[in-house]
Every structure is written in structure tokens, then in C-alpha cells.
Amino acid sequence: MAEEGKKKSKFVKNLKYYVLALVVMLFLIKLNKTVFFIFLFSIAAYILKYIRGMFGLKVVVLDTLHFSAIMLAKFIGIKEAIIFVAINTLAIDFVTFIASDGTFANFFFYSVSTAAAVAIFGNAPMILYGSIAALMYSVLYFIYRTVIIQNPPFDVISKCITSFIFTFLYISFLGPLFALIMA
Amino acid sequence: MGNTQKTAVIAGSVLASLFYFGLITHLFLAGEIILEIYLLLVLLQILLSAFAMGFYIIHIMFKNLANKLKFHFITRFMEQPRMEGNYRDNWWQLHFASRAYGEYWGMPRTYVKLQFREEKKYNGKKLAGYSNYDFNGRKIDSIQHMVRPYKNYLLMKVKGYVMDKKKITALMDFLMKAEKESRAK
């Protein structure tokens, strides 16, 4: 009974933060579209990464970071996309004391792949520049984790493949909806 | 779960999935929902189906391990897998945990338990010597002596899930050796 009471109060405590986040987001829609989308995508990336972490998965499952960066780069601006990537890689890793060389590498790879794909192929269909961005990130990550820092090949390849697959899935199925909302 | 029940659950899941897909496609073709929403609903189905299938495949892998070891699988689908049985005249339990009690999720561990009904005493210092131990490239977090009302056991926490029969039997052999060396005199 005491444990159930504890669980309930923790839920009620968290519920207040969720409601607050929702209210903040509703204000942001009216005030500033850019900040709203950066806020929305950051929350989504954090929640889905947390769910992934629950299962102890090292592969990139559910992570929407790259998809979000591509959407921001295309419909808001490349500068805003880089800011979003910086918040979700550099800032979050430093705040949670898990920053490493991989943090900077991730920031660089996500930014470069997103910016290059959107800048060069931005006028092509979304699925094309989205896939190119995803492929570019996977290739850069593979080179970094095999040539520069040698990690177990199976781990690196599985992360590259799942990262590409999930970004491609999100671009294919969620891309049109966000294009409608953000355009 | 009996075979009939298992078949019924699988068939029910497939039918539910087909029904859902049929419903959203019907709504899209009838113009009730736009293409973008349809794609979102399809993605939702893909992700949920993939997760359910992933869980099921992992569940089958653990059941296969139990069959190979001739252990009895004592948990249900979606519960943390546990199996019990005899190996080299000892009573064992294997528990595949995704977090330590009271800790955060996302820490896959294989708990190898060498169990006894009679009371045993061990040298704590010798057991502590197995903390952060490297065994054939696999990290053993610790070996602890746990006492329960109806049994006591040596609990060896191994990093990751060990699903290979040879590797798990090697770990059990190692734990038996550690048990002999750590007995209190």
C-alpha cells in the first residue's frame, strides 16, 4: 500500500512537469515556430532515447535525432538544425556528464550529413535527400569507429545499419506529415 | 503456455494486425484520413509489430537455451526470463535481468545462481575477490552469497545476456570452482 502510494505520488509529480511542458509548447506555437519545433523534437528525441535505454539496446532504435535535424534543415534552416543537433548532442552529454570524443564526433557527423544533403539535394524529393543524409552519417560513423577508434565490427555495422533504417523509416512515413505541418 | 493457447495468441495478434491495417487503408481510400496521417498510422503498426516480434524472438531464443540445457523455463512471455534445472548434480537457476533491483533499466545481466537447500557458509573476502573479474573476455560483476527462507545461493552477475550453451556451462563450471574455493573453514 505504501509502495503504491509512493508510485502514485511520483506519477503525480511527473504529471505536473508533463502538463507544464505541454503548456510551454502551446505558447511556443504562437510565439516562435522555430523554438517550438526545436523544443518538440528535443523532447521526442529524449523520450525515445530513454525508452531505448530501458532495453539496454546499443543499436539506434527509435532515435529521431537525425530525422528531426533533416526536417529542421529543410523547413526552418540549416543553422537552426545545427543548433538543434548541438543541444541534443553536446549540451545534453555535457549536462549529464557523459561527454566524450564520441559526443563531438556525433555532433560533427549529424551536422555535416544533414547540411550537405539538404544544401545539395534539397530540391529533390524528401526521401532522396533524407536517405542521402542517413547514408552519409552511417558512412562517417563507420569510418570513425573502425579507422580512428577501433570498436567491435559487429557493433559498428549494426549501429550503422539500424541508424540508416530508422532515419529512412521516419523520413518515409513521418516526413510527409511534418512537411505539411512545418511548411 | 499450452500450444493451443500460444497458437490462439499468435493467430489473434496476426488477425488484429490485419484488421488494423485494413481499417486504416479503408479510411484512407474512403477519404476519411489524408495520406500523411495514413503513413503515420502505418509506421505505428510497423514499430509495434516489430517490437512485439523482437520480444517474441528473444523469448524463443531463451526457451531454446532452456531446452538445450534441459532446464525448466519458469517465467511467462514479457517477464524477465528465468530457468531452473540440474547441472552436474547441482540445482541451478539462470535469470536474465535487464536491471538490478532498484536501479535503472538498460543493464542486461545474466544471473547465474548455484542454489542449495541446506545452509552454506562462505568466506566473504574470497568472494569479494571475484568482483569485476574477467572470465574469457566476459566481465563478472560480482559473486555474492544470498540467503532466502527456503534456500541460499551463490549469485554470479555476468555482464550481458549469455545465450550460448557452451559459454553458460563454462560460467557454471567457474562458479562451482569459486564455490569450492570460497567455502568457510
Image (cartoon, coloured by chain):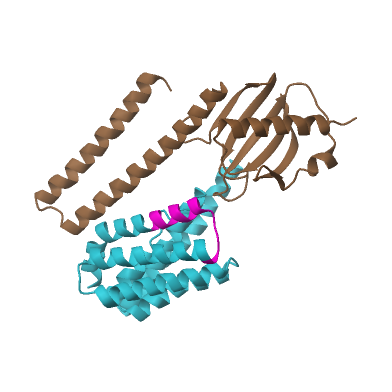
Chain colours: A cyan, B brown
Q: Residue at x 44, y 52 (%)?
A: A158
Main SS of the magenta part reads helix
In this rendering, the answer to whether A83 lies above or below B86 is below
Classify residue A32 as left or right of residue B134.
left
Q: Residue at x 20, y 74 (%)?
A: A123
Q: Quadrant of the N terminus of chain A?
A: top right
Classify residue B41 as left or right of residue A25.
left
Magenta stretch: includes residue A4: no
Magenta stretch: includes residue A161: yes
**Residue B5, image x, y percentages:** 37, 22
- Which image quadrant for residue B51? top left
Residue A28 appears in the figure: no
Outermost residue on the left side: it is B30
Front residue of this view, candidates B177 and A150:
A150
**Residue A137, image x, y percentages:** 39, 66
Q: Quadrant of the C terminus of chain A?
A: bottom left
Residue numbers of the magenta segment: A148-163
- Which image quadrant for residue A164? bottom left
Residue B129 appears in the figure: yes
Total labels: the figure holds 0
Q: Residue at x 40, y 41 (%)?
A: B54
Q: Residue at x 29, y 30 (%)?
A: B12
Front residue of this view, candidates B166 and B151:
B166
Front residue of this view, candidates A66 and A176:
A66
**Residue A161, image x, y percentages:** 39, 54
- Which image quadrant for residue B96? top right
